[in-house]
Image: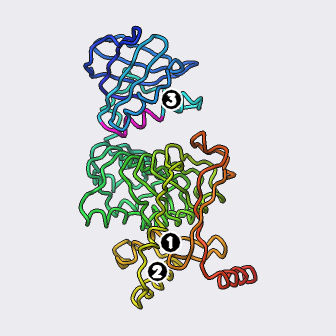
Amino acid sequence: MLFQCGANVRTIRGQRMIGPDDFITSTVWIKKENNYYLCLKNSIYPNGKTYRISYVKMDPIFFSLVKMGKIAFEFKKPREVFSIEFESKRLAYVFYRTMMDIIDGKNVIIDTNQNPDALHANNAAIDNFDLNATELKVVNSFDNRILNMKCLSTLVLEDCNSLVLPEEIGHLPIESLNISGSEMPTSQHAKDIYWNWISKPTISYTLRTLKMDSIGLTRLPFEILYLKFLQTLSINNNLLEYLPHFIGELTSLKHLFLADNMLVYIPHCLSFGTIAEMDIIHNCFHSTEPYDHLITYKENIKNPTDFKLLKHIAFFKLMGNFPKLKRQDIPRPLWEYFNYVGRCANCRRWTLPDYSRTTRIKFRPLIKKINMALHLYEEGPTWQLMYCTDKKDCDAHKKYIRVNC
């Protein structure tokens, strides 16, 4: 794991830090030799400087800088503060999470080939476009030559400027796609067509891993529903205030990474089923005034009209037989409903807040591996459920399903 960045080293003497304030262009990397080490090489330390990561002094003040693309570590031996300034906030976040995993005692796999002599950061991208290649990493922007790589199974498009994925990429047999750190489009038209590639039958069948860390997501696109065989979804370090309940339809999902968002609850449907690993650390489950998007929707409901009821009927029919349509092929007034639809926890029918009530409970799920804040380990995170308001009809439908299925 190698980074090109600015670095500054200052010595601690008593309560003072001695040394220059300037950041010098440097190469920073992590290596493992019995223990994990943080390494530095620049014009001041041409032969390199090494710190043992286990000697890091945990101080939240230093880690709070990561949101600004910076991070600093205070070491007990030697008594120094090592500050790093990254080109992007995403790189700072990736480095921070890696360091935290090592400090927490996790087994972090380090690529031994990534050192200053073996790999320069600017050469990290494979850019030869071998049409028979199965893996490709590209930086800065999407190149349409990718569309001719018919054997491509792993595609990394990190830190791309104004990334727009052409619809045709959905025809490639990609199993792993990473767009972390890339800029989302800003125009409304570009936003509307951004996820069209998911609707293509090839990629909707082959995609197993989707990483969308640090891309500024405020809502999970409903096209995710097409990825029935998706096993790993990573949406760390975004701006998500809630997860839509339709995520429970991803019945092959095993690994879900939601760290560093603004979630105050999780859909109850994720507490059971196939999930084997979940990361929900650094969210807002402790919030005293949690935002509930379903309750907010319900508070704004006006008296139903014939047109609104027709929209609901059309939407439920769509959810009952969900075809792989591009967003533009679905009437725009129906798009918003995907954020609020969910299955009744009792009868399992699709419902909207117009016809349901919501409740929240806390418990620790039976998930093999879950990473969360320490205060949640006893009572667990908050889970949100939806129930039909017409209990008689709900129970009747549940009974009908039991008899006929």
Q: Which amino acid, mark 2?
A: Phe
Residue extending furthest toward the top: 13
Q: Earlier in the sequence, mark 3 or mark 2?
A: 3
Label 3: which residue? Answer: 110
Instruction: Answer left or right for 239 relative to 384.
Output: left
* Mark in front: 3 vs 2: 2
Which mark, residue 315? Answer: 2
Q: CA distance from mark 1 to mark 2?
A: 10 Å
Q: Secondary structure at mark 3?
A: loop
Residue located 45% across and 21% down the image: 38
Comparing 377 with 367, the one in front is 377
Image x and y of residue 96, in percent: 44, 33
Residue range (magenta): 88-97
Comparing 77 with 192, the one in front is 77
Label 1: which residue? Answer: 341
Residue extending furthest toward the right: 403
Comparing 81 with 158, the one in front is 81
Q: Secondary structure at mark 1?
A: loop
Q: Secondary structure at mark 2?
A: helix
Image x and y of residue 266, in percent: 55, 57
Residue 305, above or below 63: below
* Mark in front: 1 vs 3: 1
Residues at badges 1 and 2 in contact (C-beta under 8 Å)? yes
| Picture quarter with the C terminus | bottom right
Q: How many residues crowd mark 3 within 10 Å: few (<14), some (14–19), many (20+)?
A: some
